[in-house]
Every structure is written in structure tokens, then in C-alpha cells.
Amino acid sequence: MSQDIVTRLKTDAAYWARGNRFGDFSPGQSFTHHWGRTITEGDNTTFSILTMHYNPRYTNAEFARAEGHPDTPVNPLLVFNTVFGLTVEDCSEGGGPFLGVDDLDYGVPVYPGDTVYADSETIDSRESEKRPDFGIVTWATRGVNQRGEEVIRFRRTNLVRKAR
Amino acid sequence: MDVAARTSANNYFEDFQPGQVIRHARGKTVTEMDNVLITNMVMNTAEAHFNAHRMQGGQGHGVFNDRVVFGGINLSMVIGLAAQDTAEQAVREVGMTNIRLKHPVYHGDTLYAFSEVLEVADGDDPKTGVVTFRHYGINQDDKLCVMADRRVALKRRG
């Protein structure tokens, strides 16, 4: 009985695919990435301790206040990872290793409770000489907070699979 | 609070000169917990980081045969390992460039961090200076996994 259900599901279900392939990218196109993310104090502490990032301003509220911050600022590497994470479905989920990032600049600090959003523009798309099944795509990504203030910008390059 | 008493005495702006190369204390074995927790925390939707069934079933597109650690975590782990020495006195992270993921990191691999001072410059105010570090992360087999140039404003000892 259960096996019949599984068989029917695997035969009849329409797969709602996510992610783009190399052929979907062309310079000048822009993406308003999904969701946004409110970064919490728990996120900041968890990320900073797992990466052993021993700058006390991210893990000691008294220290942060003594340095003139209203609260513990969010570790900028968490801001980077979060903004990057939000871009993945549109840009790189379709497959291929992340090669590098250039020209990353941080904007205004992020504090727990702030919400970050990500937008990207495709700025380059070319063939890979080493891997003919992949292309190389570069995007300019920008992260903003709930007030529209820029928190980060960077250019990211990935291998992107051609096959569906 | 006395913030200076809670941080090291040897990692102010004046302690860094171009050409210096530092091998940082401690390495970290990157676990499934680190990778899946942080990948999911930042809502990175790429299954290569969290679907073992798919990756072990030959669907890693001929590039990977198992879940691979998200490159943003490799970068963050290496800068984390370098942070006590190069970020404890940071007043502002300015930016990064030349971030390169050179070799994949899998669950159970161990990362070690090294840093090289590329440049030192005056800061926006007389109490700080900006140091450009090139950070390197190598694994247990001496493979270079990640490198990145990072600009950071550090306190001057004064």
C-alpha cells in the first residue's frame, strides 16, 4: 500500500525545479533575490563562535558598548554569508563550484534585528576552457538593510552547469 | 570596562609590518555540524552542501562525490582562526578582495590559517591604521584551500 503511494508519486508528480543554468545568464540582467533575512543575536553568536572569530565586539555586549556601539554588531563575515546565501537559488544553485569574490566593500554596520536583502546583476558570462560542460558567470551583488542602506557589495564568480 | 585588559597586547596596528608572515595558533576540523548549520543558517539553497544522498549518488556533476563545505564557511573559518591575532583590535572591517577557493573542503578536513601583511596605511583618524592582510587556509594535506586579501582598521597602541 505504502509502496503504491510512493510509485504513484514518483510517476505522476511534476517536479518544480529551482535554480538557473549557464544558458539562463546574460550580462545586464538583474535579480531581486527572495526572502530577506532578519539576523538575530543568536545567529551572530553561533556564527562567531563556530568560526572561532575572537574579536570580542561580536560576542560581548559590554565590550561592544564600550567601543561606542549600541549593541553587539553582526560579524561582517555573517553579513557576507547571509547576503551570499540569499543569492544562491537565482545564481548558483544550478550547479558548480564557487570560484572567488573580488571588490567586496562593507557599508553600514548590521545589528541584531536588522533585515538584509540581496540583489544581483549579471556582469559577465563566458565559456570555461577547462570544463566544457560549464560556463563561468560573474555577478555584482548588493546587500541592503530594511532602510535600503547598503551593508555590503561584492563581485562573485562561479562555474555554472550547462545541462538542465 | 577596560577593553585593553580583555584583549592581547601584541596585535595593535604598530605590531604589523609589510612582509610579516604569521602562522596562527590552532587548526579546526570542519564538521558536518559547522557546514550544514551555517549553510542552512544563511539560507544557502545549494544541495551540494546538505544533501548527502544526492551527492553520493553521482549527482555532483562530476565535480564532487560527497557534500562539500560551502566556500563562504571555508573563508570565514580561516579568517576566524586568524582573528585573535588580526582582528581583536579591529574597529572596522573595511573590505576584501582576491577571495579564491582553490581546493574543496569536506567534512572532517582540518583547516590551518596563515596571514601575510601586504600593506599598512594611516586610518581615517589618528587612533587607527589600516592593515591589508593576505589570509591563507591550508588543509591537513598541505593543500591550499582558500586565500583572501582583507583590509581592516586596527587600533593604534597610541
Image: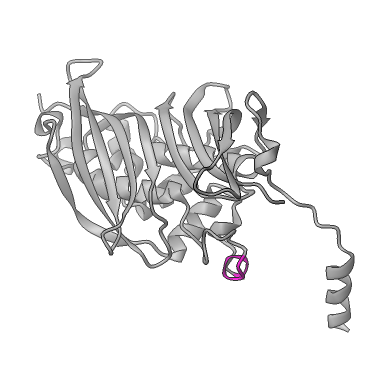
Q: How is the image coloured?
A: one colour
In the image, the segment drawn in magenta is B53-58
Position above or below: B92 against B142: above
Instruction: Determine if residue B98 is in view.
Output: yes
Residue pictured at 14% horizontal, 38% vertical: B11
Q: Residue furthest top?
A: B125
Say which quarter of the image contains residue A10: bottom right
Q: Residue at x 30, y 59 (%)?
A: B139
Looking at the image, which is closer to me, B49 or A45? B49
Residue at (56%, 50%) from the top-left corner?
A: A96
Image location (x, y in percent) of residue A144: 55, 27
Q: How many labels sit on residues?
A: 0
Which quadrant is home to the C terminus of chain B? top left
Residue B60 % position (x, y):
58, 61
Secondary structure predominantly adopted by residues drawn in magenta: helix
Q: Is residue B137 above or below residue A135?
A: below
Q: Position of residue B104 (x, y in %)?
A: 42, 56
Where A94 falls versus A2 (above or below)?
above
Examine the rendered structure and indicate whether residue B46 appears above or below residue A68.
Answer: below
Of residues A64 and A128, the one nearer the viewer is A128
* In magenta segment, residue B65: no
* Residue A126 x, y percent position in the rendering: 57, 35
Inspect this view and state whether residue A39 appears.
Answer: no
Residue drawn where x is 20% and y is 31% of the image: B118
Q: Split into 4 quadrants, where in the image is the N terminus of chain B?
A: top left
Q: Nearer the viewer, residue B139 or B40?
A: B139
Q: Nearer the viewer, residue B52 or A134?
A: A134
